[in-house]
Structure formats: structure tokens, C-alpha cells
Amino acid sequence: MDPLVRVSHLSKHFGSFEAVRDLSFVVERGQVYGFLGQNGAGKSTTLRMLMTLIRPSSGHIEVFGLDLNRHRTEILRQVGAVIEKPDHYGYLSALENLRMAAVLCGIHPTRDKLMQQLEFVGLADRAKSPVRTFSQGMKQRLGIATALVHDPSLIILDEPTNGLDPQGIADIRELIRQLSREQGKTLIVSSHLLSEIELIADSLLILHRGEKRMEGKMSDLLNPAETVVELELEHSSPTDAVLNASDFIQSIDWRGDQQCCVRMAKNRIPDLIRSLADAGVSVYSVRARHSLEYYFLQLTQTETHVGPAVD
Amino acid sequence: MLALLWIELNKIFRRPRTYIAFGAMAAIVWLIQLALYFDGQAYVDLLLSNLSGSFEFSDLFKTQLLNGYLICFVILNTLLIQMPLLVALVAGDAIAGEASQGTLRFQLTRPISRTQLILVKFLASSVYVIALLLWLALLALLGSVLLFGTNDLVVLRSTGIEQMQMDDVFWRYLAAFGFAAVALTTVAALSLLLSVLADNPIGPIIATMSVVIVFTILSEMNIPIYDTTVKPWLFTTHMVAWKGFFYVQADAEGTTIRGSIENLPAVFRSLVILLGYIAFFLGISIYLFKRKDILT
Amino acid sequence: MRIHLFVLLCLIGLAGNAQTAEELVKSVKSKLDRVTNYSATGKMKTNVIFLKAPIAKVQVYFKKPNQLRILNEKGISFIPKGSMNMDLSQLFIDPAGFDLLDLGADKKTGWRIIKLLPRDPVSEVVLSTIYVDAAAGLIRRSSTTTRENGTFELEMSYGTFAEYGLADKVIFSFNSQEYKLPKGITFDYDDGSGKKSAATGKPTKGRVEIQYTNYQINRGVPDSVFR
């Protein structure tokens, strides 16, 4: 099946500053595609280009197999987006904002239909309240409701959990899951929080300083065999002996006198601790970080490019 | 398009700030009417001071002169500067206000073209202009006529006096208000253009007023180098063409020709120039807006 | 009122006039003296270089000795200063009297030209000249020079009410002072025609023409009309 979104060699510069450089990726139908990167990596800029808020300096974007430049209106009828923090008309109610969004998409749903959508995001009891009285979380949920009002096939969410409390974050996560698994929507979700992306995305693209650093399926990246274990322990000859002798350890990285990171299979951690204890090595702390998190930090702290470019 | 227009009108007329303009206008009109009601004779004496050497002015004459039609004319004259500001308050906010609120994103991520959006915002601003003028007509014309009655209208120009009989006045006001709608729509179009260039509405509002004030000063100054070069093309020169409906023709003996306009082709020409400005401002707005990166 | 006449030496051009100037003036005056008051409806046309005004329907009221009021009840009319003098009786109102100077007949019209010189040295009127239709005993034209208000002229056309010396049409010419208002006050519309206004801003002559109908003579006019 053709990808839903195909981005080829997309670039954007503002004056001499290159916000996005030669970016290419594809999003398959039905996927939850994660955009990961630190603040200022170019995620929002890319999503704004996808939503035609910003004109690319060069490159090509196809959505639903159509050129975005030439079929913008047709494409946007099938796309819903929340770009950065969702802003609404504060002096209008949630219901009025939602109705406005529907009319802007060319549809005129009944009041009941709009109430259903507010119910879906948990705002039915605040339908008539002016939006200026809403909390950040409520505004976020209303933003999602307005993005979904016209039942789009592709949904783009830029930092959807920003400013939310843990319950709010969990709600958004559940919503995304429902949209993807139950309704078969394709989603592009951006975040600077790896933990969030990890929990919802099927595929991932890591952006750093406007460039793609990595792209791939989540299942490939979250390999339990690739856990990074951070150890705080005394660095001594017995310690070296144990670590070097353990064949399940793939790499050892000392960062100071008592800090060590080893890459190993997660299920062998107990064996390592037993071996160290048997050798009389004092272990002060053990923290397992999956490889993706470690990987992300490594990538964003170095200039390393990993993975083939996807054209 | 109609549905979009309805949305824009809803936005304009649901905001309390819109009614500041209507309130301000009512306050100015009522202040003028009040002042003239209680001290109109002093105003009339001032107007006639130039003529008292040639004519006798009885109290009846002064009362007749200070009628609703003259009061309305005085009010329209006074509001020349204020009205563009009231228009800019809304039109200048059309794009820049949404940009600063973040709701421009809300709109431009929907399947409507940027051209459509600019046109619909311009239309909504035009409807607002018409609403303002209807309000003004109600207060200044109807209100003045109710308070001061009607009589012949005497208009003082810098070098002459135009007098129209009372039943030859009302249609002129209809035409003048219609013209004023076009004139203020020109200001709305300029404000909209400046709004496209900004991310905060204060800039476009102040810029619009600055342009109108500077151009009005240039239009009114009598400096020969400006008279022949710049002045004929300033839109502010043509915005006052509504007064042309109150300049009448006279026969060889100076008798007003009923129903006449001194220079209708000139008024029409001013109208065409203003329409040209509207098209120009709107065209540039669309061109720039289509290319604008929405970063807010 | 007794008029003491001092007859000056007449020029040869007066040969052939049956009536003396004194007799003519007396005859004219006798007609005017029959009218103690009147009210009349009229159509007034105002012709002043800087003024465009419609023809107005006016009511004219007169009461001896010197009250005249032109009223436009429904509209606005610019009444010139010195409109009192539209009534011919004002020519003869000075109690000190005046000397007559007979200039004979006007070559074109045949009207008798008589100058009236007020005897009062501080009189507002400096000199009046009347053009009398001797046959009809009516003043057709007059020109009066005053100290304060310059010179004004009257032209009269008679019809139905000639026996009372009341004209059907009066044309009153007067001096109008300059008119100019700063553009900064008026915010004029400049139509770009480059056409200069006929008004020059300098003093000019103005004209008021009243076509009278429907005189109500000696029926009484209340004083309140003149307040």
C-alpha cells in the first residue's frame, strides 16, 4: 500500500538559519508515527510545513498520494491537527469553538453530534462554558476535539501532552491509542519526551538541529537485548575482571571513577549483580535504561547519524 | 463563503471591544448635540461672524440655521478623524489579532484557502463599517432631526456658502453615507493589509491611523508641489468626496438648482479611485498572506 | 411733514418738463403716504457671488415709519443688511428734510433724475438719487449712498399695486463684505478641477430680487412680527 505521507528532501531556512535540512520520511497508513527531538530540533517547523502554515524552502510533500501544494484544500479535508498549544476563541464556549471548527471544514454537524465529540474528550459538561475559563488540559482536549470534528484520516498532534498533569497525559495517551487501534486513524505525534513516544508510537523519527538522526520501527528500536545498565560501583581490578568475563555484556563505558554503563540483555542483570557481589565488588546503584533512551541521548549529544535515509 | 462570513461576523460582534466603537461614537455625537442644544447660538454666531457685515441675522434665522441637517453635517465633519480609528480597531485585528491569540493556526489548518480567508475577513470588516455608519446615521441624522427639526441646509465652504432646500437634503445624506461606506472600507482594506504584515494588532491599528493622519494633513495643506503631484492620488483626498453631494450647482444668478451636484463626475472619479485603492490593498494583502509563514 | 424746498438753478436740459422736481417728489410721496402698513407674499432670489441659495417663499411686513421685516417661515433666507431700505418711503424719512437737485430726464429711459441731499449733516444717508417715471408718478430706480453701509440700489417694476407706489418686483443691490473661511476649518472637498471659486474673498455687490404677490395693504400688522 502507498504511504499516507511522503516527505522528500524537505528544507526550511529562516534567513541564514536552517530550521530543517534535507528531511525525508514516510508515514504508513494506520501508523502512529512519532517525531522525537529536543526543543528547537525542527519538529514543529516540519509539522507546520505539513499543515501548510509554513512554506518549505525546498522539498516535496505528498499526502494521500497528492501533491500538498496543488491539492491543499482537498488534503486538509482529511487532516486534523493541533499545532503547539491549542488556541481557541476564549470568549466563545467549547461548543461554539467546535461548531466553528466544523464549519471551517465545510461540515455542519448537529448539536448532538458536537456534544458526542465533546463527550469523547471528556468536555460534555463544560460545553457551554467560555474557553477562557478552561485549564490547560481542558484546552488540550478541546484542541483534539476540534482536530477530530470532521473525522479526518490523518491526525497531527504537536506536543499533545505539554502542560498536562499525569492524569491528563494518561488520558491523551489512551485517546491516541483509541484513535489508532479502534478507529484506524493515522497519527503523527511529536514530543520531546521519549517516554511518551515510546508508549504510543509504532515508528519513530529522531530530529536534531533540523536533521534526521534516525528513523525506524519502534519494535526494532526497543530491543530488550539492547538495555543499557548504569552502575554505580567501585572501579577496581575485580570489577574489571567480572565485567570483561561476562560474555552477555556487549559494551562497557566508564564515565568517571564510579560510573559505568554497560550494554547487555535485560534478563542477565541479576547474573551480573551476583557476579559482582561474589567478587566482593561494592555496588551502590543499578539503573536499567532501555537502549532507545540511551540511544537518543547519545545521538543528540554527538553528531552521529544512524540509519539509512528513507527516500 | 456565507458560512465563513457568518463566523467572522460572529467573532466581530461577539467581542465586547467592538461595542467600544459604537459607544464612543454615541458619546461623541451626543456631546456635540448636547453642546449645540444648549449653546448652539454661540456656535451659529461664530459661523456667521464672517457674514454679519453683509446680512442681518434674526434669532429666527439662527434657530432655523441650527437644524438637524446642519447638526448632522457638523457631526460628520467632526468624525472624519475618529471613524478611521474605529474601523482600524476591527480591521487591524483581523489577521494580527488572530495571530497573537494563536487562532490563526486554528483557521489555516482547515480546508479553506488563504485567499478565501482574506476575502471573508475583508467582507466582514465591510459589514462592520456599514453597521457603524448605520449607527451613525441613526444617531447623527435621525437623532439630530428629532432634536433640532429640519430646515434648509446651509454648508459653509472656504470660499462660498451652499444652501439646499430641506426637501432636497435627505437623499444627499443617503448618497453621502453610501460614499462614506466606500471611504471607510478603503481604510479597512489598508488596515487589513497592515494586519497581514504583523503578529500583533496594536501595530496595524497605530500604523493605519498614522497613515490616515499624515495623508489627511497632506491633503489639506496648500503646498503647490504636493497639490499637483501627490495630493490628487492620496486616498484621504478622495475620502471627503462625500461632501461633494452637498455642493450644488447654481444658475447664472446664483440660484441653487434643486437636485443638482456641483461636480458629480469628480465625486464619481473619487469613488473609482477609492475602489481602486481597495482592490490594490486587497490584492497585496492576498499576495503577501499567501506567502506568509505562520509562526504564531 | 412739511418739506421746505430750496429750488436750485435748472440746466437747459430740463426745458419741456411740465412738473418741477418738487411736484414730482410730492406726487410720488403722496402715493407712498397712503400706505401705513402692509404684508405681502413674495418669492425672493438672492444673488451674491459667494452664496448659492434657492428661491425662497417669503412674507414681507411693513409698518410705518420704519419697520420692515422679511420672513421665511419655512426655510432659510439671507436677508441683506439695510433691507429696511427696500421700502421707498425710507427715502423720505429724514425729518430734517433734504434738498432736491433736478438733473433732468435720463436719455435712455426718459425717467426724471432727481438727487436728494439730506440737510442733516450727520445723517447716515449721504446722498440719494431717484429715477422717477413722471407720467406714472412712480420711482423706478433709486441709489442711496450711506456712511456705514456703502451704496445700495433699488429697481422697481409696478403692476397691480402701482397706485400705492408698491412694486410687483423689487431688485435690491447692496455691498457684501468679503467672505473667506480657513480650509482647515471647513475641510473642503477638492474636486481636482482646478476651478477657482467665483468668490474672490474681496467685497462685492450682492442682489436680492423679490417678486411680490398678494399685498394686504393697511390691514394692520402686529408689532410682534418685527421683534
Image (spheres, coloured by chain):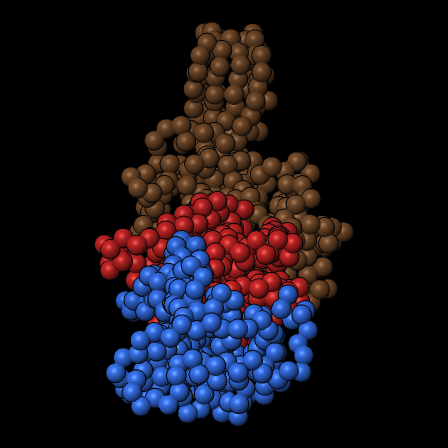
Rendering colour (chain C): blue
* A91 horizontally vs A58: left or right: right
Task: Place residue B273 in its image quadrant.
Answer: bottom left
Q: Is residue A46 visible?
A: no
Rendering colour (chain B): red
Task: Tell me what residue is drawn at x 36 percent, y 43 percent.
Answer: A20
Q: Position of residue B58 (x, y in %)?
A: 57, 64
Q: Is residue A254 visible?
A: yes
B189 or C44, nearer to the observer: C44
A15 or C200, nearer to the observer: C200
B195 or B55, nearer to the observer: B55
Question: Where does the C terminus of chain C fall, quadrant-wise?
Answer: bottom right
Rendering colour (chain A): brown
Task: Tell me what residue is drawn at x 41 percent, y 41 percent.
Answer: A42
Question: Where does the N terminus of chain C fall, quadrant-wise?
Answer: bottom right
Q: Is residue B149 above or below residue A30?
A: below
Q: Is residue B283 above or below residue A56?
A: below
Q: Position of residue A224 (x, y in %)?
A: 53, 34
Task: Tell me what residue is drawn at x 67 percent, y 70 percent.
Answer: C223
Q: Is residue C223 above or below residue B26?
A: below
Q: Position of residue B147 (x, y in %)?
A: 66, 64
Task: Place residue C103 in its image quadrant.
Answer: bottom left
Q: How many marks?
A: 0
Task: Tell me what residue is drawn at x 40 percent, y 72 percent.
Answer: C6
Q: Position of residue B149 (x, y in %)?
A: 64, 68
Task: Place residue B234 in its image quadrant.
Answer: bottom left
A183 or B100, nearer to the observer: B100
* A42 horizontally vs A168: left or right: left
